[in-house]
Amino acid sequence: MKYDRINNSLYVKNRKQFIEKMVGHTLAIFNSNDIFPISADSTMPFQQHRDILSLTGVDQEESILVLFPSCSNEAHREILFLKETNDHIAVWEGEKLTKQAAFETSGIKTVYWLQQFPTIFKQLMADATGIYLNTNEHLRANTEVETREDRFIKKVKQDFPAHQVLKSAPIMHKIRSVKDAIELELMQKACKITEAGVRRLLQFIKPGVWEYEIEAELAHEFLRNRSKGFAYTPIVASGKNACVLHYIENNQQCKDGDVILLDVGAEYANYASDLTRCIPVNGKFTPRQNEVYNSVLHVKTEAQKLLVPGTIMTDYHKQVGLLMEEQLVNLKLITLDDIKNQNPEWPAYKKYFMHGTSHFLGLDTHDVGLWNEPIQAGMVFTCEPGIYIPEEGLGIRLEDDLVVQESGEPFNLMKDIPLIAEEIEDLMNA
């Protein structure tokens, strides 16, 4: 890992929160992700399962966490199982966590090697009446690929059919959605790395550059600041490409007069940042581009004021829709008649602003959280309204990462990244 070791008080606190929500005489199991194969002997770079990471800080494959707060053996109330390291692994892959390093990382005292898991797990299940299993219940999850967790769940249900099965996901969604001060520091670091990338680009972009060259400049800046790279697949969309919401080809030349929609973010210590900025290729917005840009900025400025404790996200998105409706009328993109005759299931403004305004942010770019409960202080959301006009070859989206406060407007983790159109122009032409 490139990042510094994180204070393990974060993981001690998270495990305590999970344990407090467990019913009596139950245990909970969390597995690492697989290293996913591509073909031949090639694999994807390892990405740790965010739940075991959130509870232990262990950023290593083939790891298992067991929580059993009522276990008769006090030493077995928190257990880590790890892949045992040896000289051969150290030469070919690098050293894995030792038991002492695992304790220092997680704060868990009882650490066993993975080969001991079947025997110890059987003993634990004999002492428990139920088990919390960890399934992926993100609303947008694609669960076609079988994971290590999925295989474990199948085996548990087969081997222990008489045990009560409970869900870990609702508890983890609550824990992970409200960020600790340590997590906010890590997310701020990710945002500062993103800022360095943006400022680098403002001196680099000019007519004739290619979208992939812009991506390369960002990758360089992110890596040199101890990030693994992009928190998600970067979008570098010039001209009409900006009207494709998830444009990731990044293979076109940037032309004089076009605007580049840049949706990128660095990760740091597995925490995501998520930024969108729009940059004129030649360093100057046209009057029409500036008009649309400022309309989006107005919606963003007003929308983020709504991200306060007690807000229900479905109501929030409806209010943002009304803000956008007003701006689109001013831009002469829709009319009052369009609004009067609109389909309530697909309002008129959706023709030019068809996506949501905010999502949870954290260890995942689209982080877990409970959408039907009021938002709380300490939650982190994006705010990213946009206007997309294919007939004009123009797409504008602006996005920052915001921490909900106990009172007042949210704190903007990206407040130092240039946002005002004139500031962007000044920096490009300095």
Image (cartoon, rainbow, N blue to C red):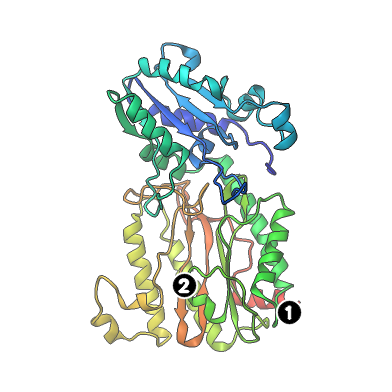
Q: Is residue 164 left or right of residue 309?
A: left
x, y percent for residue 28: 41, 28
For badge 2, the amino acid type reads: Gly
Q: Which residue is mark 1?
A: 429
Quadrant location of residue 123?
A: top left
For badge 1, the amino acid type reads: Asn
Q: Quadrant of the C terminus?
A: bottom right
Mark 1 surroundings within 10 Å by alpha-carbon count, few (fewer than 14), some (14 through 19), many (20 or more):
few
Q: Is residue 336 left or right of residue 224?
A: left
x, y percent for residue 359: 44, 57
x, y percent for residue 37: 56, 47
Distance between the Cα atoms at labels 2 and 1? 25 Å
- List the single residue furthest toward the top: 72
Q: Is residue 84 above or below residue 171?
A: above
Q: Which residue is mark 2?
A: 386
At mark 1, the secondary structure is loop
Q: How many marks?
A: 2
Q: Is residue 96 above or below residue 122?
A: below
Q: Is residue 77 visible?
A: no
| Residue positioned 62% across, 87% down in the render | 257
- Tag on residue 27? none
**Toward the viewer: 323 or 123?**
123
Which label sits in the foreground, 2 or 1? Answer: 2
| Residue positioned 30% across, 85% down in the render | 336
Q: Quadrant of the N terminus?
A: top right
| Residue positioned 71% across, 65% down in the render | 217
| Residue positioned 56% across, 62% down in the render | 275
Mark 2 surroundings within 10 Å by alpha-carbon count, few (fewer than 14), some (14 through 19), many (20 or more):
many
x, y percent for residue 237: 57, 74
Q: Is residue 101 visible?
A: yes
At mark 2, the secondary structure is strand
